[in-house]
Amino acid sequence: MRLGALAVLTVTAALAAQLTLGHGGRTNSAGCHNQTSNGTYHCHNGSSSSKAKRSSSARSEFRKYNPCPATGKTKGACPGWHVDHIVPLACGGADKPYNMQWLTAKQNLSKGSMGCSYN
């Protein structure tokens, strides 16, 4: 009897965890994955927001010393280019200028989830 109750409890706990996470799996070690239906990358890390908070001052500092490759300007739009975190924030990377680089939009969007092999 005790073994049966333990089995039921284990299955119930596993199902409850699956429903709580709201995701069927295939996430990397940081709980992130590419959403094939809309081409986005997002994380299931337990917070209410799927994106890490980014520092506008860190980005401004990066741009101050690394002008837009397309325009040469340190402010405003930079068509076709994205500021990328070398070690992703989701993997514990710092939101600091030394962890930022310019990537073309195509490069950045095509790299997808590389996991957290940076640590």
Image (tube, rainbow, N blue to C red):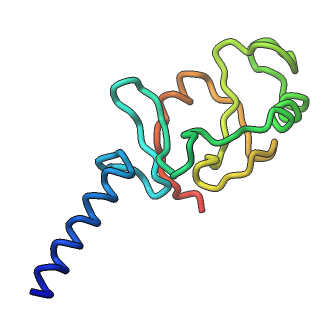
Q: Is residue 94 above or below residue 38?
A: below
Could you tell me which residue is drawn at 30 percent across and 58 percent down? 16
From the top left corner, tell me how far across and down residue 67 is, in percent.
Answer: 84, 23
**Where residue 30 sits: x, y (%)?**
50, 55
Q: How many marks on residues?
A: 0
Which residue reaches farthest bottom?
Answer: 2
Q: Is 63 on the left or on the right of 86, as rendered?
A: right
Of residues 64 and 40, the one nearer the viewer is 40
- Image spot of residue 11 (x, y percent): 20, 67
Residue 91 as seen in the image, left or right of residue 95 = left
Residue in the picture at 64% in, 15% down: 80
Front-lying residue, 11 or 54: 11
Residue 37 against residue 85 in the figure, above or below: above
Residue at image position (34%, 59%) is 17
Q: Which quadrant of the figure contains the C terminus?
A: bottom right
**Whole-percent x and y of residue 103?**
64, 29
Residue under the point 61% across and 46% down: 88
Front residue (pair 105, 91): 91
Is 15 situated left or right of 61 in this image? left
Q: Quadrant of the N terminus?
A: bottom left
Q: Would you place residue 26 above or below residue 36 in this image?
A: below
